Amino acid sequence: MSSDESQNAASSERRDAVREKAQQVKARQSRARAIRRTTLVTLGVAVIAAVAVVVTWTVSSSATKPMADPSNVSGGFVVTGVSGTGVPSAENGAGSAEATPAPTGDAAATEAEPTPTATPTEAPAVDIRVYVDYLSSGSRDFQVANVKQLSKWVDTGAATLTYYPVAMLTAKSNGTKYSLRAAAAAACVAQNSPEYFFAFNNALLTQQPGVDSDGLSDSELADLAQAVGVDGPKVVRTCIESQSYTSWVKTATEQALEELPDSGGVALTATPMILVNGTQYVGKIDDPKEFAQFVLTVASDSYYKATPTPTVTPAP
C-alpha cells in the first residue's frame, strides 16, 4: 500500500473517531437536558401540590371556624336573663331601681271628662342599646352605676336591653389585644350560654383590667366565664381559648364606626354609647338617677306618641 493510501485511511479513522466521540458527547448532553427538564417538572408539580395543600387547609379552617351569628341587629346581644350577676331578681322582691319606665297616663284627668274617653293601652317596653368596650373605664362606670336598675327593667319586662361589644381599644393592652379578645369572649358566652351573657358582661366590666396593661389571658377569660356559672363551660372555654369570634368582632367594630344600625346615620365615636328608643343619652354615665329619669322621659314621650286618638262616645 502506498503512503498516500495509508495517510487517507488514517485520516478517515480519525474522522470516524471524532464523529463517534461527538455523538457520544451530544447523547450525554441530551440525557442531561432531559434529566433537568424532568427534575424541573417534578419540582414544579411538588410546589403546586404544596400550595394547593396550604390553600385547602386555610379555606377549610376558615370554613369550619365558628362565626358569631347574632339573632338581633348587627352584632348586638339581647339580655335574656340576669342569672349569675349577684343582683336579686324582681321576682323575689329585691333589686329596686330608681324609676321604672312604664308611664300610664293621668287617670284622674280621664275620669273627669265623661266624653270623649281614651282607650287605655299598655306602655311598650323601652329599647336600651349599650355599646361597650371592655377596656373602657366609661363602660365600666356605666355598668357599675346602673346594673341594679337595668336588671330590674329586664326582669319586669319594662325594657329590652341589648349590648354591642366592640374593640376600639385593642391597641391599649401591650400587644395582647385584650379589648378584641374580651369582646370575642363575650360573643362566645352570648352564643353558647345566653342566659349568662349579662352576668359575664357585668363581670368583664366590674373586674376590668387597667388600660395599657396585658389584661386577662384567654384562659383567665374562660375561668371568669366559668365562675359566673355559664352552661356548657367546656364548650365556652374552647370557644374563648381558640378566639373563635375575633374576626367577627373586628367586622362589627368597623361597621359601628361607619354607622350604627337604625340610627339615622349616627356612628360610634366613643364607648359607652347608650341609645334609648334611638335617642342618645348624653348625661352622666355614673349617675343612675339621671339615667333613670332620661329613660322615663323617653318612655313617656314614646307612650303618648303611640296612644291612639281618643274616640267620642255619644251621650245617651
Image: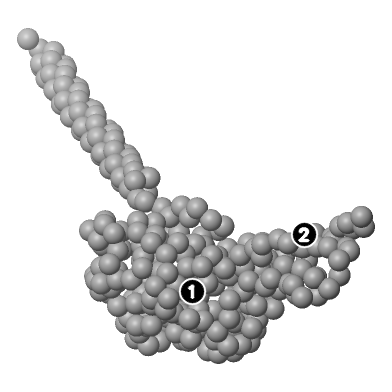
- Amino acid type of the residue tagged 1 in the rendering: Lys
The count of marks equals: 2
- Amino acid type of the residue tagged 2 in the rendering: Thr
From where the camera sits, is residue 43 visible? Answer: yes
Tell me the SS state at disc 2: loop
Q: Residue furthest left?
A: 1
Say which quarter of the image contains residue 191. bottom left
Marks 1 and 2: which is nearer the front?
A: 2
Seen at 30% across and 64% down, the residue is 230
Which quarter of the figure is the C terminus placed in?
bottom right
Seen at 83% across and 73% down, the residue is 112
**Disc nearer the start of the sequence (1/2):** 2
Number of residues whose C-alpha sits closer than 10 Å to that of mark 2, classed few (under 14), some (14–19) or many (20 or more): few
Q: CA distance from mark 1 to mark 2?
A: 28 Å
Residue 171 point in image, percent of width and height: 43, 78
Q: Which residue is mark 2?
A: 119
Seen at 42% across and 64% down, the residue is 81
Left or right relative to 49: residue 251: right
